[in-house]
Image: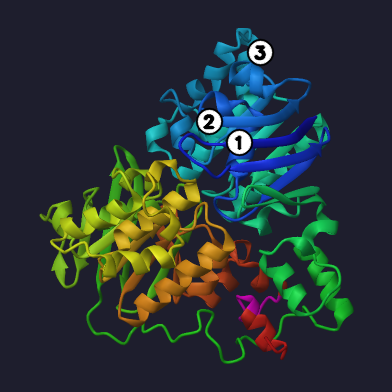
Amino acid sequence: MIEFSHFSYTYPGRETPALHDVSLQIAEGSFVLVTGTSGAGKSTLLRALSGLVPHFSGGRVSGQIRVDGHDPLHEGPRVLSRVVGTVFQNPEAQAVLERVEAEIAFGLENAAVPLAEMRERVDEVLALLDLRPLRDRRLSTLSGGERQRVAIATALALRPRVLVLDEPTSQLDPEAAADLLEALARLNRELDLTIVLTEHRLERVLPYADRVVALAGGELAAEGPVPEILDRIPQLPPVATLARSLGWETLPQTLAQARRFLTLDGHSTVPGPNGSAGRRPNGSGGGNGHSPAPLLHVHDVHFAYGETQVIRGVSFEVHPGEVVALMGANGSGKTTLLKTIVGLLPAGRGEVWLNGRLTAGRDVAEIAQEVAYLPQTPDDLLFADSVREELAITLRNHGLSPDAAQIDPLLARLGLSTSAGRYPRDLSVGQRQRVALGAVMVTHPSLLLLDEPTRGLDYAAKQELVALWRQWRAEGMGLLLVTHDVELVALVADRVLFLEEGRVAQAGPAVAVFDALPRFAPQVARLFPGRGWLTVEDALAGLNVPG
């Protein structure tokens, strides 16, 4: 179905190729996971399949590509769009119309699909992706995860032979991600649909993939069936990392395999006494409750979009040196709550206090002096000509001198030193996310509000951020984190607030909330239920394995 033959590609204005001498074959009906660190060339590889590289982006190209007998390099995206359905990392940039149903039908109209068949296909994908309740909604009122599902439905409606997805679960909660991947696996089995996707949260995709393509520095590092290649991937999901630490010859692809292997290895998966061998999941006491004055106090906050009530009486606090994770299904009100806290949306009822002062009546610019906010779409914060200038502008806006002593160490910690002079919007999504993080973090504010900060980040980049947050947290910074990344929550959170339909349904220490909501729990907690272990380090300590 797909063949790359000595394919190389270099973006305009760059000397180093994004992809170099890539040769691989993908059979019809394969379910392929493309993996690699941020900037390894994954998105470029996917864009080449649909002809967007080089027809949309320009640049230098050599070698050949064939997709179902077509030549993307010569025929371009107009022809390939009938064969390859593409879903980008940023679904907001892919939308054309305003209503959900009209957006899904738009591609079918351009393909001159008869009206009766068009209606049938739209109904089909609405049901497949659980979008029927949203069919008449405006896209601007949807959550990031809901917009992601709409973009996937739009691609599937054209019934392509190949479906290409770039980080398709990055904005989905664990249940929605599992539902989506189950739907893709069913299409893969029943329709022989060839699926090629990238995803940094390997724990989500590995149970469904049959092959892995690993890229490193724009080159093909490894390729083959998942069981054969898993031990050659440097960055592994938690259960595989645990298996490697335990010395297993075969690494588990799924939780079910890990449970069987643990039994054979003599380690019980039966629930045991709660506790994590005297360790906290984040390796620190957290500082919550130690300060009499919270950085943030939210009291009985309500918010509605028109007649639709989104936030319903939410109350909580964030103290200095505390990390609070805000979790919940897509559309539960998490992002809306953050926007209410920083004044981008006015609370219909209730109060928000920052450092002992009410935010009511204060403009956003004044509130931003006390709290840093990173939105779900980092491109909203990028408008300078270079990465370094993005951070310098923030410092100047706060009346600070943009000297190298403040900027360079942060760029290094974010893995952006070599990109300091580059135009931010030319970077990968994961790199742009880190630039935006740098722009809001460079002033070292007392409180950080982050909305899906690990979207598009590989495991190594995520660990770098965790290390940085822990350092700032030790200095008294508070962090309110909205995320669907349960493994991140396991690493950093002192407390978890779980929203359902705009209300706090669960609140407490991370271990307790995950015990109450196992479907949202990290892999280690699901592998060892009831033991209070959230991370690989917890499990190794609890199993008395040197780590």
Q: Residues within 10 Å of mark 3 (few under 14, many from 20)?
A: few
Earlier-in-chain disc, 2 versus 3 = 2
> Residue tagged by mark 1?
9
Earlier-in-chain disc, 3 versus 1 = 1
Element type at marker 2?
loop
> Residue tagged by mark 2?
59
Q: Which mark is residue 335?
A: none
Q: Is residue 294 left or right of residue 213?
A: left
Decide: is 200 above or below 136.
below
Q: Residues within 10 Å of mark 2 (few under 14, many from 20)?
A: some
> Residue tagged by mark 3?
117
For the point 48% across and 28% down, the residue is 100
Q: Residue furthest front?
A: 15
Task: Tell me where the magenta segment starts and ends, as one range.
Answer: 528-536
Is residue 495 in the magenta section?
Answer: no
Element type at marker 3?
helix
Earlier-in-chain disc, 1 versus 2 = 1
Front in this rendered view, residue 166 or 268: 166
